[in-house]
Every structure is written in C-alpha cells, then in structure tokens.
Image (tube, grey):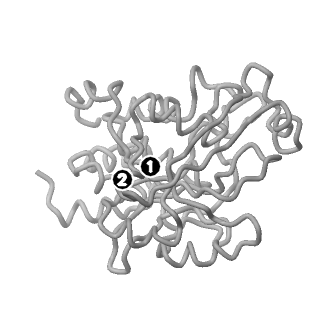
Amino acid sequence: MIGAALLAVLATTPWVKLDDDARAKQAQELQKLPLSERLADVAEGFLGTPYVLSPLGEGEGHDPDPVIRWDALDCVTLVEETMALALAPTRDQLLPTLNQIRYSGAPAWETRNHITEAQWLPHLVETGYLKDVAKQWGGADTRVLKKVLNDETWKAKMAQGLALPESARPRGEYALNVIPPELAVEKLARAPSGLVLVIVRSDRPWLVTRVSHVAMLLQTRKGPTLRHASRSSRKVVDEPLGSFIKRNLDYGKWTIEGLAVYEVQTPPSLAAAATQKAPAQ
C-alpha cells in the first residue's frame, strides 16, 4: 500500500514534466484514492500549465491540433483530461477514455461535443460520466436556465465559424439546473472536491451557447475554490469561488446567471475494466 507522503509527492508532480512511463505510474497510484480526491490531485498536476484556447484536435483535418497534450490547456480540456486521467483504469485506456468524453462517435470534428448545454453535458450525463447534482446542493433555490438553438442561431457568425455540417447542428431547447451566483459560495461550502462547475451567463440569442467557462471545485482553507484554466491568468490556477463570481458579475451585460453543478462518476463502460485492471507497466 502506497504511503500518504509518497502519494502527496506523486500527486503534485506536474504532468508535463513526466515521460509516458512516469505519467502512467503516477496515474495508476492515484487510482488508489477515492474519486473526489483523485480528481483534485490529478488536476493539481496541471497547476501552472499555460492557457491556450482549443489546444486539442483530431490530429488532422479541420482541427489538426494534437489529440492529447500536456503543455497547454483551456477550461474544457482541463476538465476533460482530468476526468480521463482519473477514470481510465490503465494507460492503454487513457486516450480511448478521453475520446469517449470528447466525442459522440468516432473522433472527428463533426462528432466532437462542441456546444456545452446541447452536446457536451447531455453526452456526458447519458454515458454516465457526469450526474447533475445542482438540485442536491442548491435545494429550493435551484433555477432552470434555457438555451434555444434554431435556424436563426445557426446563421449567426459564431455558429457559422464552427463549420459544422447540417446533420451535426443540434436544434431545440436545452435546460440547465443552476445555483444562483449570489448563493453559490454558501450552497457549495459543504460540497465535495472534484465537482464540475459550469458557468452560465445571460442569454444572447445570436450565440450558440450561454456557457462561458467550466472548472473543478475544490474545498480549501479559503472555502470553495475553483481550479481552472484561466484566460485572464493565462494558466491553470486556484481561485476562491467568491472572488471569481464577484469579478464576473461585473462583466458587462453578459453577466453570470447561474452555476450548473455535476458530479464525476465512473461510467458503466469503465466500471468493469476498473475492477479487473492490470498493474501499470
């Protein structure tokens, strides 16, 4: 059984500084932690990693960026890579797990889950990677925010920039359960580390999403804290949730209207493999 001191050292080793073998060994040792702790420790290995918008792609075609990398992240890929590292039971399953998180089908630009409330979140809930727990923590104060995607939305500049074929353009009304921002610190004070927080802003009909950011929740001596890839800080940082909300509530007319909250789970596709995993080579 690994000692607590050694585990702490492993948990704080930056992923970018490890070769493939050392990275696999570190990920394997972290499998011994409960999932909420594992997620926090995996994300700790990304602290300080530079922020780069959309650093991952398919390695070819419309987005030739690498399918996985360790030297750059944005807010979504921080959460995706953290989940994959925490959940994949063996090194051979890391990339397949990341692909299952990022895509609805074989990896391709058209099958990537681009739009948070219409694709990314519904896919992760349906496949068992995430569970909506906003009502659990928000109680009676939980609100519902909606986003409508229609033909007019897809004619707008942002939607056209995605260059998605007609068959890959979701349409309909998509709802998110959210905790009001002014209550989030209080409501999440007792929530476990490792939850995924989704920042939902006021609706702009000409945008395909009203989600501006995703992050991991930590519990620290400063209270609820975001571990997130911050565009303003240009790297992955820890920031008190209250400070993040305060400065973003003042962000012009596109203010925060709620925080959706999700619990990371081991999906059925990985549950059997996790019980039969082989030791890292």
Decide if residue 90 is on the left or right side of residue 183. Answer: left
In the displayed structure, 171 sits above or below 242; it is above
Secondary structure found at label 2: helix
Q: Residue at x 39, y 29 (%)?
A: 92
The residue under the point 83% across, 44% down is 158
Question: Could you tell me if residue 72 is visible in this image?
Answer: no
Image point (82%, 32%), residue name: 163
Q: Earlier in the sequence, mark 2 or mark 1?
A: 2
Q: Please report contact status of discs 2 and 1: CB closer than 8 Å, yes or no.
A: yes
x and y percent of residue 188 in the render?
A: 38, 65
> Which amino acid type corresponds to the residue marked 2 in the rendered image?
Leu
- Rounded to the nearest angstrom, the CA distance separating label 2 from label 1 is 6 Å
Q: Residue furthest left?
A: 1
The image shows residue 168, relative to residue 21, as above or below, that is above
Q: Quadrant of residue 222?
A: bottom left
Can you identify the residue that label 1 sits on? 82
Mark 2 neighbour class, 10 Å CA radius: few under 14, some 14 to 19, many 20 or more:
many
Instruction: Compare residues 217 and 144 and report the one nearer the observer.
Output: 144
**Where in the figure is residue 201, as x and y percent of width and height?**
66, 58
Amino acid type, mark 1: Thr
Residue 266: % across, % down: 32, 36
Along the viewing direction, whichever of 280 and 76 lies nearer the viewer: 76
- In the displayed structure, does residue 63 sit left or right of residue 5? right
In the picture of the structure, the residue carrying the numbered disc 2 is: 39
Q: Residues within 10 Å of mark 1 (few under 14, many from 20)?
A: many
**On screen, residue 146 above or below 44:** above
Which of the 4 image quarters holds residue 275?
A: top left
Q: Residue at x 61, y 38 (%)?
A: 174
Looking at the figure, which quarter contains the C terminus? top left
Query: Left or right of 10: which side holds 46?
Result: right
Q: Is residue 29 left or right of residue 134?
A: left
Q: Does residue 30 appear in this view?
A: yes
